[in-house]
Image (cartoon, rainbow, N blue to C red):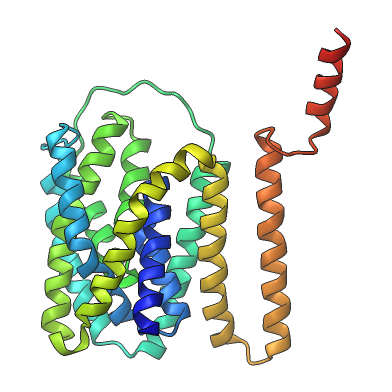
């Protein structure tokens, strides 16, 4: 019962993040499951099985609202599905103690990337250029994203969405819709790979249902959170959580001294808190912003 509760809470938190940022379900849930001692292959398999229904619903919704660019979806989905299947096979045949630090390192980089994407990257309002995506670019991009998604339990959205947006070839809604719809094929293929290479006996359906249930419950709360909390603050909180949890895994593997590990964890937490305050100050949301106080005093005098 305790394990079911943990998986449900992980699903809730991961969907809360994904529904607010548009990415991060796999990276967040995988990070938390690894922290609770779940083997990488089991974590990734559970995540992908729970995502079958959610990616199907998301893909159909985007198709209904015509947010999918049908000219590029297969160029992403097919190579991603193939390498996702291969990635499931690779992960299933590697010892968890060997692969766990590498998964943690990949997920840690995802956390850093999320913070960079939403906090430090300069957002430019560029006009969308007319043009088509080359298959020479899309096929390897989809292949890399599919493999990383299977190995890390997440990565399809964080890899594909920013790369497609940066090229300014299609509108953002088509990017998000196409990536979401194509993810269904990758999820199905990866899940099939885990069934073949890992075996049904290693997959706990109750845990899959618990993870999915937590995600379903979180859906309306994520919509509320988007309205309540600025996206850049949420990105720092999420990115920091992913960095902290995976740093803990890496530190436990690389450093034997518990005192040293705790000191480094403390430094990470302080840096995380400092980044939250910096982000609030940067967007003039800091409650003790001197500049804001001065401007208010000037307004009162006038």
Does the rendering let one see residue 280?
yes
Q: Quadrant of residue 98?
A: bottom left
- Measured as percent of width and height from the top left, residue 251 is found at 59, 81
Which quadrant holds the N terminus? bottom left
Please say whether residue 137 is visible from this viewpoint. Answer: no
Q: Is residue 98 left or right of residue 48?
A: right
The quadrant holding residue 203 is bottom left
- Tell me the residue at 66%/50% (across/down): 276
Residue 112 drawn above or below residue 7: above
In the rendered view, would you say 267 is above or below 277? Answer: below
Q: Position of residue 165 (x, y in %)?
A: 34, 37
* Residue displayed at 57% across by 85% down: 252
Left or right, 276 with reference to 79:
right
Compared to residue 195, the image places residue 57 above or below, namely above
Which residue corresponds to the image point at 38% horizontal and 52% vertical from the top-left?
Answer: 18
Residue at figure coordinates x 51%, y 43% from the top left? 118
Q: Position of residue 146 (x, y in %)?
A: 24, 61
């Amino acid at each position: 019962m305790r394990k079911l509760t943990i998986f449900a809470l992980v699903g809730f938190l991961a969907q809360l993040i994904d529904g607010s940022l548009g990415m991060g379900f796999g990276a967040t849930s995988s990070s938390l499951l690894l922290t609770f001692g779940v083997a990488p292959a089991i974590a990734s398999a559970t995540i992908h099985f729970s995502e079958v229904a959610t990616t199907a619903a998301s893909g159909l919704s985007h198709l209904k609202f015509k947010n999918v660019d049908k000219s590029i979806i297969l160029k992403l989905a097919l190579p991603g599905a193939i390498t996702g299947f291969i990635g499931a096979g690779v992960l299933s045949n590697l010892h968890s103690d060997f692969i766990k630090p590498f998964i943690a390192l990949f997920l840690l980089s995802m956390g850093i990337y999320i913070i960079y994407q939403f906090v430090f990257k300069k957002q430019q309002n560029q006009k969308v250029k007319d043009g088509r995506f080359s298959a020479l670019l899309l096929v390897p991009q989809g292949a890399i994203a599919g493999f990383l998604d299977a190995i890390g339990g997440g990565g399809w959205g964080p890899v594909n969405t920013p790369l497609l947006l940066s090229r300014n070839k299609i509108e953002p809604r088509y990017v998000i819709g196409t990536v979401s719809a194509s993810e269904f094929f990758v999820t199905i293929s990866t899940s099939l790979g885990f069934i073949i290479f890992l075996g049904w006996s290693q997959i706990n359906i109750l845990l899959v249902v618990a993870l999915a249930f937590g995600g379903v419950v979180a859906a309306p709360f994520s919509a509320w959170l988007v309205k309540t909390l600025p996206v850049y603050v949420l990105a720092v909180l999420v990115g920091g959580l992913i960095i902290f949890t995976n740093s803990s895994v890496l530190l436990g593997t690389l450093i034997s001294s518990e005192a040293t590990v705790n000191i480094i964890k403390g430094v990470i937490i302080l840096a995380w808190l400092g980044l939250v305050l910096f982000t609030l100050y940067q967007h003039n949301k800091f409650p003790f912003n001197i500049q804001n106080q001065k401007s208010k005093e000037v307004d009162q005098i006038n």
